[in-house]
Structure formats: structure tokens, C-alpha cells
Amino acid sequence: MIFDSHSHTRFSADSEMEARAALRASEALGIGLVFTEHLDVDFPGENDFTFDPAAYWETYAPLRGERLRLGVEVGMTPETCAASRAFVARAPFDLVIGSIHVLDGQDLYYPAYYEAHAKEEAYTAYFAQMAACLKTHDFIDVLGHIDYIARYAAYANPELSYGAFQEAIDAVLRAAVETDTVLELNTRRLGERRAVKELVPIYTRYRELGGRYVTLGSDAHAADAIGAHFAAAEELAAATRLRIVTFKERRVELL
């Protein structure tokens, strides 16, 4: 059974998705699900992207089983590594995703960072922080949405081109392989033909460097987004010879 290994319920500050609605959606699709609530320590702005791991576990443990796993998505910055490590140790998570959401204290969701930095500068900094954090955040299992910045970058052409950032992206991919971190194939943008085209060389290179596995993640914050574009993701994984996996009790589970 394929798993959607990246989703957010009401324990995440930016989601109101109810667990049972998410499970109904996943069951209708015949897929499993991992809840990966946001942990972004000291997140800039008004939202508190933290949660109580004990309350999370108490609430969802009765639902946990073959179809549902419980995880966390850690926002990676150099300054918050120790606090994130301590948080992850507070619950027996099945899966820990590490992602970049913040650069220089600014939320990459908003245009302010991009207004102050040219695209080459912004994307190079993004990948540099990602590669560095992979080496320090040795408590994560999966690198989340390598193309996150392309979702929101306020440039005329925000698309992520491997050819334009090959050296910076290779540093990330090498760090992932060296730290035995699985690469996520985030499906949020796979409805866009251009995005698929630009992602293929990245995952091909990951395979060339020794990567073997990917998780699939919709990054759903609403039940109707569960499993979005999974057919395209499965095609991309097959084309790049990467095996789709999920995690259970912090161990790779072959699907």
C-alpha cells in the first residue's frame, strides 16, 4: 500500500483538517497516511508552529495502525537544531521530516525575502542551508519538499532548474546520501508539467549519487488534497528508478 507520508491536521498552526476526514479520504484512495505536524521553533510571525507531542500522541494513538502513522515535520535552521532534537525525543514518532521554511529569519511563504534578494542569491542560500542542516539534523529521516522555494518565490520565473543550480543542488543530494536521509517526492506541484520536467533531473541525479528511496507526500492541509498527483509521482519515481517507501517506528518500510 502506498502512503501519503506528509500531511497536516489541526495540530499544525496552518491546518484545520480533521483526522477522521483525512482517513476517510485516504481509505477512498486505497492509500495509507502519515500525519506530520509542523514544528518550527521560533517561527517568525504571528503563528506558533509548535504543538504538544504528548497531547498529539494521546489524541491520535487510538487511530494509529497499518493505515495511519504519526510523525512530525521539523523546520530546519542552524539556530533551532538543538531544540528540535529535544522535541523529537519526546514522542515515539514513526517519521521525522526535515524541511526549510525560513531563511535569515524570514518566512519563505511571503514575498519579503524575495524582494530583498535576487533569485540566484535566494536559491543558492536556500540550498546551502539545506545541505548544512542535513549534516547537523541527524535525527531526521526524510528531506521534505526540495522544491518548496519554487512554490512561493516572487520572481517572474520562480521555477527550479537543476541546470542553473547544479552545484548547490548536488551538495544537498550528496548530503542526503551521506546521512542516509531519504528524499521526499512532494506532489504539491506535480500538476504542473513544467515542474515535473524540472524535477526529473534532480531525482535522476539523486539516484546517480546513490539514493535509492523516496517517500511521497501531498503536504495536504485539507482532506481533498490527500494523495494529490500521486499518479504523476509514481511515474516520476519509476522513471528515475527510485523505490517508494514510508517509515514505521523510524525505520524504512518497503511498499
Image (tube, grey):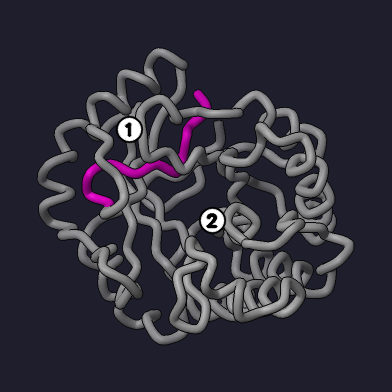
Q: Main secondary structure of the magenta part?
A: loop
Q: Amino acid at mark 2?
A: Gly
Give the residue furthest to the right: 163
Whether residue 3 appears in magenta in the rendering, the answer is yes
Q: Residue drawn 78% across and 69% down?
A: 170
Tell me whether the residue at label 2 lies in contact with that at label 1, contact meaning CB atoms closer than 8 angstroms.
no
Can you give x and y, in whole percent of width and height, for residue 200 in the image?
Answer: 80, 45
Q: Which of labels 2 and 1 is toward the front? A: 2
Which sits in the foreground, 77 or 15?
A: 15
Please, what is the three-letter code of the amino acid marked with disc 1? Leu
Depth order, front residue of 32/22: 22
Above or below residue 21? Residue 127 is: below
Residue sitting at x 60%, y 28%? 229
User: Which residue, given by chain and number where applicable, does mark 2 sit on?
Assistant: 144
- Image location (x, y in percent) of residue 184: 59, 49
Tag 1's secondary structure?
strand
Residue stretch in magenta:
1-12
